[in-house]
Image (spheres, grey):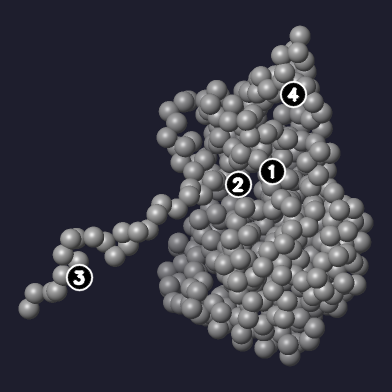
Amino acid sequence: MKPTRIHSNGDSLFQDITFAPDIPIYATTAAYNKDPCPNKLHLGIGVYRTEEGKCHTLNVVKQVEQTLANDLSADKEYLPITGMPEFNKLSAKLMFGSGSPAIKESRVVTVQCVSGCLSLRVGAEFLAKHYHQHVVYLPGPTYGNHPNLISAAGLTLKTYRYYDPKTLVLDFQGLLEDLGSALTGAIVLFHACGHNPTGVDPTCQQWEQIRQLVRQRGLLPFFDCAYQGLVSGNLDDDAQSIRMFGCDGGECFVAQSYSKNMGLYGERIGSLSIVCKTADVARRVESQLKLIIRPLYSNPPIHGAAIVTAILKDRDLYQKWTNELKAMRDRLVQVRRQLYDSLCNKGTPGDWSHIIKQVGMYSFTGLNKDQVDFLTREYHIYMSSDGRINIGGLSSKAVPYFADAIHDAVISSLPSSTLA
């Protein structure tokens, strides 16, 4: 029996679908890949690269993967819905500290997720279903995918002041004012450290003021932690903002990613931790997280979790990891200094000290869209249109070329009367 044709004219059922707009960061990468220029630079997507421009794979990760490959007893059985239990336990300890009261009292529930993105999404889905307030305040600006991940769960987005584009520093007073007038019980998204895209973080004293205000206003903190260890070079120091909230008896959410600090980008490995008031609440929360995860991806992949677990549970491997992490962080600081010195030596108009004051993988250069377009057109340098650059993607040997390009872009954008 022949199948019945639905449309005699051959039109698709999806004929009326229009092209979606390009996703900027991936469009930048695609343009870079097509560019034949040998001097091209890719400073867009957040990947820590070697001096040769290749994605950096940590030596300790290579060592662990070899061990895993040689383990003939291992299998590929499905993980539980909440992921690898040992991975979850070790990830919570890394985030909240070995002496965390919340962990000791079994008030922390941690589930393995598909990197930081799905950690955020699972948390957002939980809040949409089980929390009375559906408004989330995001810092202005924030990671480009935050609005997508959170609004997709049906939550409403608002913004609080964070970065002052005029002074190129934290707008702390504006932050306090906006959170002070936020809706009672609202969810507030914080970057734990290494703020993306600005590279501007609050001090420990400012974090304590933020914590007090959040608790006084009854707000719910939701941390995104993607750069632990890459800001100060110390895993404990980079988790201080989270630990302030995690040990005060209140509740909070933490999305954690190992993409950057272990170089496990393609493994998509992360976790969601929720600090609850009591152990009983934590058990109930975990039961509901299972129902959220099941229709999303059923259970997480095993390989990335196996790598992370092997490193976190072994003292020697952990030490090797922290040593490599410190070296990565030190290189970020070195490249920042080199770029700053190059611009100063050239006499590039403007104050460029913000480059060395900012921290982590990113720098908000202060370049505008026209200047960024100039860099791409004239120097084949690809970066975000808002002026953000990935310091981790800039090699020391490429700094002089990049500094020349910035100098030219700034000079070219000045009024002719200024140059005269």
**Foreground disc of the pair 3, 1:** 3
**Disc 2 packing (10 Å; few <14; some 14–19; many ≥20):** many
User: In the rendered image, which residue does mark 3 sit on?
Assistant: 6
**Which quadrant would residue 87 be assigned to in this image?**
bottom right
Going by the numbered disc 3, the residue's amino acid type is Ile
Split into 4 quadrants, where in the image is the C terminus?
top right
Helix, strand or loop for disc 1 = strand
Amino acid identity at mark 4? Leu
Q: What element carries label 2?
A: loop
Q: Please, what secondary structure does the residue beneath circle 4 have?
A: helix
Q: Are marks 2 and 4 in contact (CB under 8 Å)?
A: no
Q: Do the residues labelled 4 and 3 touch (CB within 8 Å)?
A: no
Horizontal relation, residue 357 to residue 154: left or right? right
Q: Distance between the residues labelled 4 and 3?
A: 65 Å
In percent of width and height, residue 394 lies at 62, 35
- Tell me which numbered mark, 3 or 1, is placed earlier along the sequence: 3
Q: Residue at point 49% right, 69% down?
A: 301
For residue 43, above or below residue 136:
above
CB within 8 Å, label 2 to label 1: yes
What's the mark number on residue 343?
4
Q: What separation in Å lies between label 4 and label 1 (alpha carbons)?
A: 17 Å
Instruction: Tell whether label 3 touches label 2 (CB within 8 Å).
Output: no
**Of 398 and 325, the residue lying toward us:** 398
Residue 257 appears in which quarter of the rendering? bottom right
Mark 2 or mark 3, whichever is nearer to me: 3
* Percent coordinates x, y for residue 352 in the rendering: 79, 30
Q: How far apart are marks 2 and 3 (CA)?
A: 46 Å
Q: Which residue is labeled 1 in the image?
A: 362
The mark nearer the N terminus, 4 or 3, is 3
Please count the marks in the image: 4
Residue placed under numbered mark 2 in the picture: 46
